[in-house]
Image: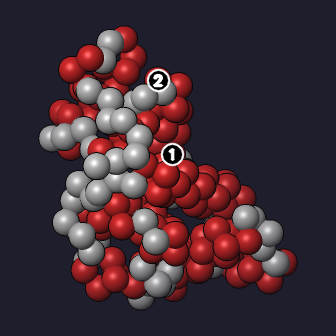
Amino acid sequence: MTRIALFDPASANGRTKLLLDSLQARRGRVTTMVRVLANSPAALNAYFSFNSAMAGGTLPAALRERIAIAVAQANGCETCLAAHTAFGKEEGIPDDELSLARRADSSVSQDAAALRFALQVLKTCGRVSDEELAAVRAAGFGDAAIMEILATVFINAFTNAVNHVAETEPDYPRV
């Protein structure tokens, strides 16, 4: 049982209902974490709006999923690790790449650079060295992509924290 009440999607109205219905249609379920977030329509809206905005960015969904996996692994969030591994599989990421993402690595050098940078951003709360910033740039990431890496790190750190505070159980198979 979670330490934060699970919002009942059947009682939703307005924008909250639209968001939860959208998730139900897209994923076939409203996850425990989202039911926790839905206690605050503002937090739920922020989460969905953030993810919607990121989908229109320059980073491919498969790289965002691997960043989410690296962050979940680093933060010890089994719920997010399970979910993003499942989402990564939906994106067609091979199992070996999903495993490498848990170590902030990839067989693709550009992706490996992004994952290493993301982990340093997480560990240092953005206080990366000049060398680390130069390395991600040298791998081909411009300022827009760097900002999207930061955004992906911290939306996932947020959801990791939601799961830790609420003590949610994974909705997807554990990794």
Give the residue number, with chain letter if any, for mark 2. 41
Other residues around mark 1 within 10 Å, as few (<14) / some (14–19) / many (≥20): some
Element assignment for label 1: helix
Rendered residue at 43%/65% (across/down): 77
Which numbered mark, 1 or 2, is in the foreground of this view? 2
Instruction: Say which of 140 and 24 sits in front.
Output: 24
Residue 55 in sight from this viewpoint: no
Rendered residue at 30%/44% (across/down): 32
Locate residue 154, reporting x and y percent: 60, 55
Task: Return the disc, 1 or 2, that comes first in the chain's sequence.
Answer: 2
Taking 122 as reference, is 17 left or right?
left
Vertical position of residue 156 compared to residue 21: above or below? below
Quarter the C terminus occupies: bottom left
Amino acid type assigned to the residue bearing label 1 in the image: Met
Amino acid type assigned to the residue bearing label 2 in the image: Pro
Taking 150 as reference, is 96 left or right?
left
Image quadrant where residue 7 sits: top left
